[in-house]
């Protein structure tokens, strides 16, 4: 593991080097100047795994360094170490992520051995996870064939009531069952579909698959709403609303059994056509959800203009909100707005009991996230339910 430390104070460098050596790091390079660090990083033969950078430095400061580091296409990990106010450090971290850098975390100076160990442990975990997350890019032809061959399948993730714990529905998340690569995630093929005119076929396949399963669940006595993700491009097709209505009829699922989730950041293209399709879907009594709320550029304008009846708060405002006053303020305001607009509120990214308690106490109606269940094959839902019933009881939620 090759480390690079940047800090204008010689003493801070020395201290951090000692601490890292005590934790077993043997290859540590130090520099007092960000400019020199960038020169080192520009050298192709020097591949650093982790760069530790101070924020407050004379000359090129930590923020400028982050920007320049991103420009070098640095593919290692970054740790920010600073004695500054936590909000400045958080902003710097977000900025680094926005630049596409991999941020391991930040350290408060003077650095505690525990915090340092935590960062190194996180690094080790990410490295261990890497070979699994073998990423390759897929071409349009391959994807077209996969859709036609039924290799795009839906996983499902439960949404539950925060009051009673009852199952409120499931979100269907596309997965590609790839013959060689195993399970491929949507971030590796949705963009490809959108860029190559395949998103209509893909959405239709996922939707029909979801509705068939909804039929089976209903036949088995499980009246569970299914939510399917749409892409902005689906809304450019004026026939889309009719397709959805006929797919519902064919599967024998009532319109109230379907939710369509639209990602807000993609709601920026042809607003007129989107408005037309969404208005017709609402007229047919299909629920519309504004997904990843808070992450796009015009959240409030979308809310004003489009007939959504569910607001899904992005996980970036949910997980950890109880420990972050800014997140909490945004979250509470979003929940309040949903309520005043008569919309159902859903929080995604509920990862632990703290998230659950905080959201519940803030009045959020529906929860989704790893704390409740990870996305699973649709056939696994029946096995998950009794397990959840047990936990629901243990948590003292409304007796079934
Ligand atoms: P999304 O609609 O916001 O879906 C939620 C994503 O968050 C899913 O990722 C889910 O696995 C993940 N997630 C759920 N709970 C947690 C949690 O507690 N913590 C964290 N960190 N993550 C959680 P996934 O399945 O990788 O999907 C990513 C995105 O791909 C989706 O975001 C959606 O925008 C898109 N997508 C998925 N399926 C389809 C589809 O059929 N059509 C279209 N157009 N987009 C899809
Ligand atoms: Mg979604
Ligand atoms: Mg989302």
Image (tube, rainbow, N blue to C red):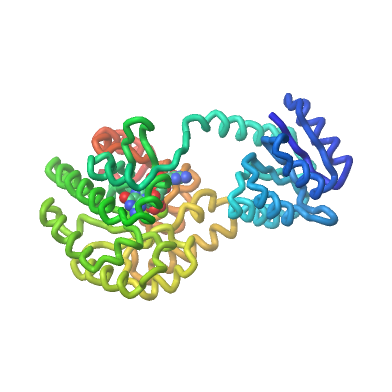
Residue 375, quarter of the rendered image? top left
Number of numbered labels in the structure image: 0
Q: Left or right: 61 with respect to 99?
A: right
In the rendered structure, the answer to whether residue 220 lies left or right of residue 34 reads left
Residue 63 vs 398, above or below: the answer is below
Q: Is residue 115 visible?
A: no
Q: Give the position of the C terminus as an image quadrant.
A: top left
User: Does residue 286 appear to the left or right of 110 in the view shown?
Assistant: left
Taking depth in this image into account, of 330 and 139 the one nearest to the observer is: 139
The residue most toward the right is 10
Whether residue 149 is visible to the viewer of this picture, yes or no, is: yes
- Percent across and percent down for residue 144 are 29, 46
Q: Residue furthest front?
A: 141
Residue 199 % position (x, y):
31, 54
Name the residue rendered at 87%, 45% in the picture. 9
Residue pictured at 65% horizontal, 53% vertical: 90
Q: Position of residue 124 (x, y in %)?
A: 60, 30
Name which quarter of the figure residue 278 lies in. Answer: bottom left
Q: Position of residue 225 (x, y in %)?
A: 24, 52
Determine the residue positioned at 21% across, 46% down: 209
- Quadrant containing the N terminus is top right
Is residue 46 or residue 299 the one in the foreground? 46
Asked if residue 14 lies left or right of residue 252, the reply is right
């Amino acid at each position: 593991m090759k480390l690079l430390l940047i800090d204008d104070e010689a003493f801070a460098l020395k201290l951090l080097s000692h601490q890292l050596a005590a934790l077993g790091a043997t290859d540590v390079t130090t520099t007092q100047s960000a400019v020199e660090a960038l020169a080192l990083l520009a050298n192709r033969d020097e591949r650093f795994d982790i760069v530790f950078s101070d924020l407050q430095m004379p000359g090129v400061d930590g923020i400028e360094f982050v920007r320049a580091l991103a420009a070098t296409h640095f593919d290692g990990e970054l740790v920010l170490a600073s004695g500054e106010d936590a909000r400045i450090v958080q902003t710097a971290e977000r900025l680094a992520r926005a630049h596409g850098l991999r941020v391991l975390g930040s350290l408060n100076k003077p650095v505690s051995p525990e915090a340092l160990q935590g960062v190194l442990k996180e690094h080790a975990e990410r490295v261990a996870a890497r070979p699994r997350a073998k990423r390759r890019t897929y071409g349009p032809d391959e994807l077209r064939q996969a859709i036609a061959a039924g290799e795009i399948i839906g996983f499902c993730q439960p949404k539950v009531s925060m009051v009673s714990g009852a199952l409120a529905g499931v979100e269907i998340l596309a997965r590609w069952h790839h013959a060689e690569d195993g399970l491929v995630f949507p971030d590796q093929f949705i963009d490809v579909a959108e860029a190559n005119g395949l998103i209509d076929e893909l959405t239709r396949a996922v939707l029909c698959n979801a509705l068939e399963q909804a039929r089976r669940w209903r036949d088995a006595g499980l009246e569970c709403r299914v939510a399917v993700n749409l892409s902005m491009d689906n809304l450019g097709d004026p026939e889309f609303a009719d397709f959805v209505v006929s797919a519902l009829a064919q599967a024998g699922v009532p319109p109230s059994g379907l939710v369509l989730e639209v990602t807000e950041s993609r709601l920026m293209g042809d607003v007129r056509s989107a408005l037309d399709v969404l208005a017709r879907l609402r007229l047919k009594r299909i629920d519309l959800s504004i997904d990843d709320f808070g992450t796009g550029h015009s959240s409030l304008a979308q809310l004003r203009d489009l007939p959504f009846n569910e607001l899904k708060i992005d996980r970036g405002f949910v997980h950890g909100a109880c420990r972050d006053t800014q997140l909490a303020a945004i979250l509470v305001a979003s929940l309040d707005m949903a309520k005043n607009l008569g919309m159902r509120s859903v929080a995604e990214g509920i990862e632990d009991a703290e998230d659950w308690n905080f959201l519940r106490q803030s009045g959020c109606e529906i929860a989704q996230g790893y704390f409740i269940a990870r996305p699973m094959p649709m056939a696994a839902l029946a096995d998950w339910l009794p397990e959840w019933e047990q936990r629901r009881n243990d948590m003292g939620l409304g007796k079934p």
